[in-house]
């Protein structure tokens, strides 16, 4: 599913006629392309697979971030406070109801030193801890960033990697894990 989404998203954003689309419109196009590619509109569609994603477009001139999300929020840490940019509650792909919804577009004014965090659910869902059967969970994930946001990005990367390795211990990784942080200077 990730490869299909990646390839379709690349096609969409490279098409000159789509250059003026906002993040929600791009996710809407991606959603429609995934549904068509997987033949999900047919009554006996091949698959009901979905994909969680969030998409950011940054206008460096106006300092405005354009954002839309499918399930995963975008976290922003500004001056030691965590801001959640809300995602829609549905994934890319046709829902069980068969009713395709439109994604919501959000605009966010960027300030110097804002830290943006994008992620998959794999980090928060990773099993580990003392018993090996507890999930890491989002409150701990957010708290980690609130304690490291002022460190250099390379050090933040180390902390994020070492924290999850320590958490999972000798247990296997249970899902894909991707965390992307970027800072505005």
Image: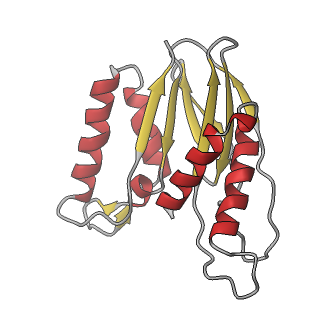
Q: Nearer the viewer, residue 115 or 30?
A: 30
Residue 139 in the image, given as x and y percentages of width and height: 49, 47
Q: Is residue 160 left or right of residue 33?
A: left
Residue at 72 percent of width and 77 percent of height: 96
Q: Image quadrant of residue 180?
A: top left
Q: Nearer the viewer, residue 23 or 185?
A: 23
Q: Image quadrant of residue 132?
A: bottom left
Above or below for 129 versus 24: below
Residue at 66 percent of width and 39 percent of height: 15
Whether residue 37 can be seen here: yes
Residue at 28 percent of width and 59 percent of height: 129
Residue at 79 percent of width and 75 percent of height: 98
Q: How many marks?
A: 0
Above or below for 103 versus 41: above
In the image, farthest residue toward the left: 170
Above or below for 26 versus 22: below
Whether residue 93 can be seen here: no
Q: Is residue 86 left or right of residue 160?
A: right
Q: Image quadrant of residue 86?
A: top right
Q: Is residue 179 left or right of residue 74?
A: left
Residue 147 in the image, given as x and y percentages of width and height: 39, 29
Above or below for 137 versus 110: below
Residue 30 in the image, given as x and y percentages of width and height: 67, 53
In the image, farthest residue toward the bottom: 44
* Colour mapping: secondary structure
């Amino acid at each position: 599913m990730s490869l299909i989404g990646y390839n379709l998203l690349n096609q969409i954003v490279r098409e000159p006629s789509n250059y003026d689309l906002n993040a929600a419109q791009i996710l809407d196009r991606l959603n429609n392309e995934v549904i068509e590619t997987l033949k999900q509109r047919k009554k006996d569609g091949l698959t009901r697979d979905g994909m969680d994603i969030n998409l950011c477009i940054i206008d460096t001139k106006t300092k405005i971030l354009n954002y839309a999300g499918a399930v995963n929020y975008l976290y922003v840490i500004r001056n030691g406070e965590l801001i959640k940019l809300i995602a829609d509650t549905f994934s890319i792909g046709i829902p069980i109801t068969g009713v395709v919804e439109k994604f919501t577009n959000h605009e966010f004014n960027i300030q110097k030193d804002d830290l943006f965090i994008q992620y998959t659910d794999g980090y928060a869902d990773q099993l580990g801890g003392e018993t090996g059967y507890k999930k890491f969970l989002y409150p701990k994930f957010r708290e980690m960033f609130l304690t490291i946001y002022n460190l250099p990005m390379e050090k933040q990367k180390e902390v994020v990697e070492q924290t999850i390795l320590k958490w999972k211990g000798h247990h296997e990784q249970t899902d894909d894990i991707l965390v992307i942080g970027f800072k505005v200077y």
